[in-house]
Amino acid sequence: MAEKKTKQPADAGAAVLEKVATWPEPFRSMGARVHAVILDSVPELRPKLWYGMPGYSRGGPVLCFFRFDDGYMSFGLTEKAHHSVEDGASDQLMGSAWFLTRLDEATERRISEIVRKAAG
């Protein structure tokens, strides 16, 4: 049986932006901004569609991703990202997913910090 291939633009970054362009506002604008924040934070990350959502890697496994579904945007890390317990934490939990409904400067800074840490 022949393998079925999904048609994607040659430029994976364009494919990510095309996906984000299908989302309703304000998530379309938020997605475009999160895409820019991720790439500004770790310029060597490469965008690609990963399970139909924007994902970012160094050419290997995806480290971080975001998606829109049911009125929320979620931003997450995969098991391939660098994870460590926060300094001074009283437990051993390590964050791997967050929901957001707005994007402000503080949230952009936090996403940038998370992406830089995830990239190790």
Image (tube, grey):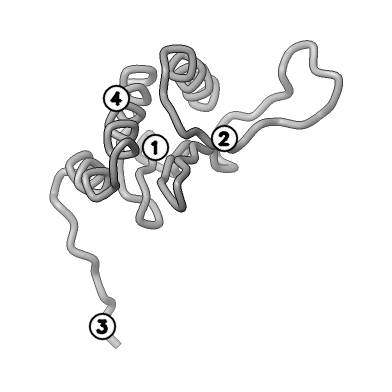
Mark 1 residue type: Ser
Q: Earlier in the sequence, mark 3 or mark 2?
A: 3
Cα gap from disc 2 to disc 4, whole angstroms: 18 Å
Is the residue marked by circle 4 packed among few (<14), some (14-19), or many (20+) residues within 10 Å?
Answer: few
Which residue lies under the disc numbered 4?
36
Q: Earlier in the sequence, mark 3 or mark 1?
A: 3
Question: Foreground mark, 2 or 1?
Answer: 2
Question: Foreground mark, 4 or 3?
Answer: 4
The residue that appears at 38% across and 20% down in the rendered structure is: 42
Which residue lies under the disc numbered 2?
98
Location of residue 103 with respect to 49 vertically, above or below: above
Q: Position of residue 113 (x, y in %)?
A: 51, 16
User: Residue 2, labelled with which disc?
Assistant: 3
Query: Given contact means CB atoms under 8 Å apart, are the residues at marks 2 and 1 in contact?
Result: no
Check disc 1 and report its element: helix, strand or loop: strand
Mark 3 residue type: Ala
Check disc 3 and report its element: helix, strand or loop: loop
